[in-house]
Image (tube, rainbow, N blue to C red):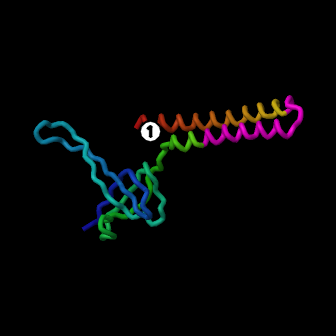
Amino acid sequence: MPKRVVSGIVTSDKMSKTRRVEINRLVKHPKYKKYIRRRTVCYAHDEANESGTGDRVEIVESAPLSKLKRWRLVRVLAKSTEVDVAALRAARKGATQAESEAIEAAQTADGDGSEAAVDSSEAAVDSSEAVEDGSEAAGDGAEDTAGE
């Protein structure tokens, strides 16, 4: 008997070498003839820890590996394009703190504040452009996932 090969989405990668994969399907209700969303949860073995949350993966049946694991990861079909908003905010906050520290250091190091103010304003413009570029990339990724 051939082994089943199915594709699903990784919903958890918190365990080492184990992934929680959800396989979504539509089932027609016997009485009301309306389609209902159903899902099957499988635990798959990922030896190289190559998949992450949100990735579409292909898994194949295998002999029992543990209490819940009965599948092995074959390959990653598509990597996730989701952006971690909390990480972006932390990076942006870190950039603004670094800016203020650089401004303070420049002002204390130089007795004349006029030149330091010009240098620090140029640094602030450069770092704000980098933060804006990162937020635009995050917005593009969010639009892609919302359309699916």
Residue shown at 44%/39% (left/top)? 145
Badge 1 crowding class, 10 Å Cα cut-off, few under 14, some 14 to 19, many 20 or more, is: few
Dot 1 falls on a residue whose secondary structure is helix
Q: Position of residue 23 (x, y in %)?
A: 31, 51
Q: Say whether residue 91 is left or right of residue 74.
A: right
Work out whether 73 lies above or below 115. below
- Determine which quarter of the picture holds residue 99: top right
- Quarter of the image where one finds residue 43: bottom left
The residue at which mark 1 appears reads as 145
Query: Was residue 116 drawn as part of the magenta stretch in this picture?
Result: no
Viewed as shown, does residue 114 lie left or right of 2?
right
Q: How many marks?
A: 1
Q: Is 102 placed above or below 12 here?
A: above
- Secondary structure mostly seen in magenta is helix
Residue 130 lies left or right of residue 83; in this view the side is right
Of residues 26 and 114, which is closer to you in this image? 114
**Residue lying furthest left:** 31
Relative to 103, say whether 24 is above or below: below
Quadrant (top left, top right, bottom left, bottom right) of the N terminus = bottom left
Find out whether residue 101 is within the magenta segment.
yes
Name of the residue lying farthest toward the right: 111
Q: Identify which residue is drawn at 15% across, 37% down.
A: 33
**Residue 49 position within the rendered picture, expressed as x and y whole percent measured from the top left:** 47, 61
Q: Residue at x 68, y 33 (%)?
A: 129
Q: Amino acid at mark 1?
A: Thr
Q: In front: 121, or 29?
A: 121
Q: Which residues are magenta?
A: 91-115
Q: Position of residue 72 (x, y in %)?
A: 37, 64
Q: Is residue 14 left or right of residue 61?
A: right
Task: Tell me where residue 20 appears, x and y as whole percent.
Answer: 36, 56
- The quarter in which the C terminus is drawn is top left
Asked whether 43 or 78 is in front, the reply is 43
